Amino acid sequence: MNEMIWIVLGSTIAAVFGIAIGVLGPALAMGRAINSALEAMARQPESERSIMRTLFIGLAMIESLAIYCLVIILIVLFKNPLLAYIVN
């Protein structure tokens, strides 16, 4: 039973670090994308619709990376495959 506690504790700590790193990257990328879009609109206001459409598609792609990270972390937390080796 002691091994199970260490596996759960290690998985929880790894999940915390994983979600922190997995969200930090997309957050920085979103900030850079928005900054670049605002600079482009300031230079060429007539192309606002095209820039905004491309920005929203890019932001959706970036956000999907954070969602994939969240899904993997939730799998590790609630359906940990390593616990099957200890229970047997």
Image (cartoon, grey):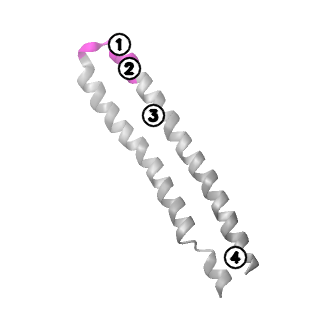
Disc nearer the start of the sequence (4/3) = 4
Residue range in magenta is: 37-46
* Residue 38 tag number: 2
Marks 4 and 3, Cα distance to the nearest angstrom? Answer: 39 Å
Q: Is residue 14 left or right of residue 54?
A: right
Mark 1 = which residue? 42
Rendered image: mark on residue 4: 4
- Mark 2 vs 1: CB contact within 8 A: yes
| Residue 17 colored in magenta in the image | no
Distance, label 2 to label 1, CA atoms, is: 6 Å
Secondary structure at numbered mark 3: helix
* Residue drawn where x is 65% and y is 88% of the image: 88
Identify residue for label 3. 30
- Foreground mark, 4 or 3? 4
Asked whether disc 2 touches disc 3, contact meaning CB atoms under 8 Å apart, the reply is: no
- Residue at 56 percent across and 51 percent down: it is 19
Q: Dot 4, crowdedness within 10 Å: few (<14), some or many (≥20)?
A: some
